[in-house]
Image (tube, helix red, strand yellow):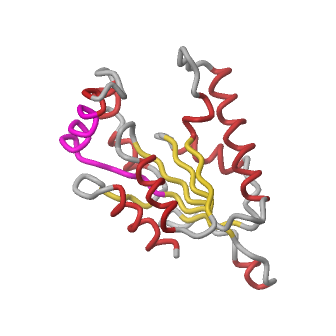
Amino acid sequence: MSSTGEYLFRDSYILRGIDVKNLVIINGTMGVGKTATCRELQKILPLNIFLDGDWCWDMTPFTVTEETKAMVMDNISYLLNNFIRCSEYENIIFCWVMHEQWIIDELLSRLDLGSCTAKIFSLTADCEALKSRLNKDVANGIRTKDIIQRSISRIKKYDCLNSEKIDVSKISPKQAAEAVSARIL
């Protein structure tokens, strides 16, 4: 992997004239704007498909156990591999919290990336911007108040990841998506 968060698999495929896909992975703490940024990115990137990792374990009650963690990783890798194999897509957009490097590494190890460039971005924000976003979600009934401290406690973990960092404290999801697309197109 390069120092910019790009996993390089495409050189031999370009030489052979095989179409190469972009796998755009966006992580960040809860409430930082991953899903909103990805929705905006869908408007920019051609021939794309989007998967939010949270959809792969949207259960009630939400239960995090070794079994459900294994299940969500299986679900995500299954779907992403299908997207990679499908000739209709050039750009695969994926977001999930992924606050530790081993999670990213485990996911990538399960994917058939032979025809892909995987580019990883971490959305970061300062504490005040993150609190403001989360408080709006709490006020709108989207999240519960306990999310604020849990999310803030994870902010610094993203500094240690092998990814390109995009500070979204003072920019909109559209601007964040434009920053991502400028780095991959």
Q: Please state if 26 lies on the left or on the right of 150 as rendered.
A: right
User: Which residue is drawn at the image coordinates 63% and 67% (left, top)?
Assistant: 47
- Figure check: 183 above or below 94: below
- Figure check: 81 above or below 90: above
Q: Say how many tags the image has.
A: 0
Is residue 133 one of those drawn in magenta? yes
User: Which residue is drawn at the image coordinates 73% and 81% (left, top)?
Assistant: 14
Q: Please state if 6 lies on the left or on the right of 67 as rendered.
A: left
Q: Position of residue 110 (x, y in %)?
A: 73, 47
Rendering quarter of residue 86: bottom right
In the rendered image, which quarter contains the N terminus?
Answer: bottom right
Q: Position of residue 85 (x, y in %)?
A: 79, 59
Q: Residue furthest left?
A: 128
User: Which residue is drawn at the image coordinates 71% and 49% (left, top)?
Assistant: 109
Magenta stretch, residue numbers: 121-136
Q: Where is residue 153 in the image (x, y as percent from the top left)?
A: 32, 32
Q: Nearer the viewer, residue 180 or 108?
A: 180
Q: Nearer the viewer, residue 51 or 160?
A: 51
